[in-house]
Amino acid sequence: MTVRHFLTLQDLSPAELKKLIDRAIELKAMQKRGQKHDIMCGKTLGMIFEKSSTRTRVSFEVGMTQFGGASIFLSPRDTQLGRGEPIEDSARVLSRMVDAVMIRTFAHSTIETFAQHSSVPVINALTDDFHPCQLLADIQTFVEHRGSIQGKKVVWVGDGNNMCNSYINAARQFDFELVVSCPEGFEPNQALLARESDRVSIERDPLKAANNAHLLVTDVWASMGQEEEQAVREKAFANYQVNSELMALAAKDALFMHCLPAHRGEEVSAEVMDDPQSVVWDEAENRLHAQKALLEFLMVGY
C-alpha cells in the first residue's frame, strides 16, 4: 500500500478534502457527546518541533489521546536531529518505530526530504512555505458557520507568507476566489500566483479588496524568524490592518479569521478580534478536530 503524506493541500484531492472536512465536523460532534473513538490504540505519533508552538502541539497531542493513541515530542535539543544526523537517516529510523510523523520546521525542503525516506505518513505542521493543517481548520470553521466556501470571495490582508501560500492552494482545492492585499515586496509565492491566476489576484488597496468579501483573513506582520524586521514591517503594513472600516466593506455576513497568536492593534484591531463576526476561537479549536480527521485518514483510513 502506498504511503500518503500531507505536505500541502495538493496532496489530497478536492473530493478527499471535502470528505476530511465533513469527517472533522462529525468527529467534533462525537467528542462533544462524549462518544469514544479509540481507533489509535497501540499507535504512536512522532512530533518533531524545530519551531515553537502552542496550538499545533496541544491539538496533535490531545487528538492522539482522544483516539486512544500516544504521541512523542521530539526537539532538536533532545535528539540527534540537532547534532547533524542526516534527515534521510532520521526518517528511515523514526518511521520504523512510530506510525506517523508530524513536523514543524523552517525549510519546506526538510519535510519533503523526510517524506521521501519515510515509510509512514508525514504531516506538515508548518514550514516557512506552507501551513496546510491550519487551512483545514479554517475551512471547517467556515463550513460550520456559513456552509460551503465554494464560489465565495476570500480576502487575505497582509504578508504573503506561508498561510497566504496555503490559501492559494485552498482556492484551487475548495474552488473559491482569493484576493491577496499586500504591499509591494511582500507578495506570496510567484509560481503559485501564476498557476492560480484564474482565481487568485493581487489588490494593493485593502479597501478595494474587502468589497463584498465573505471571509477576511490575516496573520502577524512578522512571522517566526522575522522578529528583527518588525520595525520595517510595521511601516510597510501600516495601511493593512483589518479593522471595523474594512469589515464594513465586506458582505454583511462576512467572517474574520486569524491563525493566532494575534497582535491586537497591529494586523487586526481589538474591536474586530472581539466582534461576533470573528470566529478565531472556533478556528483555533478546530485545529484539534480537523487534524483528528487527517490523522484518521492517513493512519487508519475511513
Image (cartoon, rainbow, N blue to C red):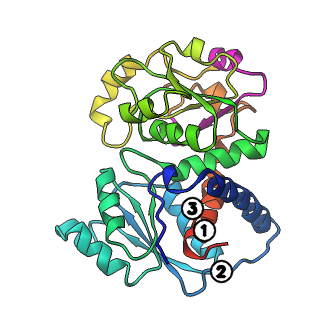
Residue 32 in view = yes
Q: Which residue is mark 2?
A: 39
Q: Residue at (58%, 54%) from the top-left corner?
A: 13
Mark 3, secondary structure of its residue = helix
Instruction: Assess disc 3: are there few (<14), some (14-19) or many (≥20) residues with their C-alpha within 10 Å of its C-alpha.
Output: many
Q: Dots 3 and 1: beta carbons under 8 Å?
A: no
Q: Residue at (31%, 71%) from the top-left corner?
A: 117
Instruction: Assess disc 1: are there few (<14), some (14-19) or many (≥20) residues with their C-alpha within 10 Å of its C-alpha.
Output: some
Label 3 or label 2, whichever lies nearer to me, is 2
Residue 244 position, x and y percent, is 66, 18
Residue 283 position, x and y percent, is 64, 46
Tag 2: residue type? Answer: Ile
Q: Dots 3 and 2: beta carbons under 8 Å?
A: no
**Real-space Cα separation, disc 3 to disc 2, in angstroms:** 17 Å
Residue 297 disc label: 1
Tag 3: residue type? Answer: Ser
The quarter holding residue 35 reads bottom right
Q: Residue at (50%, 57%) from the top-left corner?
A: 56
Residue that lies at the very extreme toward the right in this rendered image: 33
Rendered position, 102 above or below 125:
below
Residue 261 position, x and y percent, is 51, 42
**Real-space Cα separation, disc 3 to disc 1, in angstroms:** 16 Å
Tag 1: residue type? Answer: Phe
Number of numbered discs visible in the structure rendering: 3
